Amino acid sequence: FFGNSGTEAVEAAIKLARFRTKRGKLVAFYGAFHGRTYGSLSLTSSKLVHKTHLGPFLPEVYHTPYADCYRCPFGQEYPCDTECVAFMEEVLFRRECNPEEVAAVVTEPIQGEGGIIVPPPEFHKKVKRLCKVHGRLRVDDEVQVGMGRTGRFLGMEHWGVRPDIVCLAKALGGGLPLGATLASK
């Protein structure tokens, strides 16, 4: 699906994930930037200024810590045991959010606005496995890092993870307003 921007690509991914799974909840990560339109801004949590005086946002959007080994929210040192994924499974999905009602987990391969955060090697693989457990889709926001900007076509290729839905923009349009949402069958 083609659109005019990365935020439109993310909006399309939200709609597709909800339509395909018939579920309404979404999970994103602290520090993430997914855009400035209503749905994508609901997923964004990089800076408070993006959301100030603009809510309420989409209901049933949950945020969880990203794998930031430099400023680990769990006090771990690199290489860690990816406590952030354990937190998602043991706290988020047991206390706040029924995992069987989650349509998708939305991630950036490398967090851009969050501080150019490159996660540890196992992070994306563990998140993908966690998604498969209850049939959640994995949405990969490649707006900033996709189209060869990390040395591979998709940034997620560095971790050997194949997402269900991919959002592309910036490098895709080469400065022109163009975004795309790609999905497997």
Image (cartoon, rainbow, N blue to C red):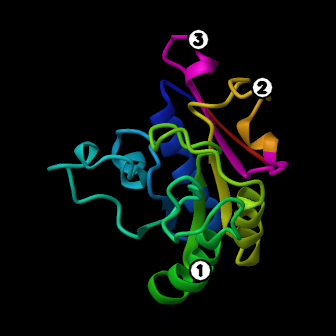
Residue 151, labelled with which disc?
2
- The answer to whether residue 163 is above or below residue 59 is above
The location of residue 135, given as percent across then percent down, is 72, 72
Residue 60 on the magenta span: no
Q: The N terminus appears in which quarter of the rendering?
A: top right
Disc 2 residue crowd, few under 14, some 14–19, many 20+, Cα 10 Å: few
Q: Identity of the amino acid at label 2?
A: Gly
Residue at 62% x, 63% y: name it.
Answer: 77
Q: Look at mark 3 in the image and give the residue it sits on.
A: 174
Residue at (63, 20) in percent of width and height: 172
- The answer to whether any part of residue 131 appears in the image is yes
Question: Disc 2, disc 3: CB below 8 Å?
Answer: no
Classed neighbour count for the residue bearing mark 3: other residues with Cα under 10 Å, few (<14), some (14–19), many (≥20): few
Note whether 23 is above or below 178 in the view shown: below
Q: Please state which of the two labelled residues, at mark 2 or mark 1, is closer to the viewer.
A: 2
Whole-percent x and y of residue 7? 45, 36
- The answer to which of marks 2 and 1 sits earlier in the sequence is 1
Give the residue type that dot 3 points to: Gly
Query: Which residue extends farthest top?
Result: 175
Q: Secondary structure at mark 2?
A: loop
Name the outermost residue toward the right. Answer: 160
Q: Please tell me which residue is depicted at 52% across the width and 52% down the height of the picture.
A: 15
Mark 1, residues whose alpha carbon is within 10 Å: few (<14), some, or many (≥20)? many
> Which segment is the magenta one?
159-179
Which of the two labelled residues, at mark 3 and mark 1, occupies the earlier sequence position?
1
Q: CA distance from mark 2 to mark 3?
A: 17 Å
Q: How many marks?
A: 3
Separation of disc 2 and disc 1 at Cα? 34 Å
Provide residue 21's location: percent of width, then percent of height.
64, 67
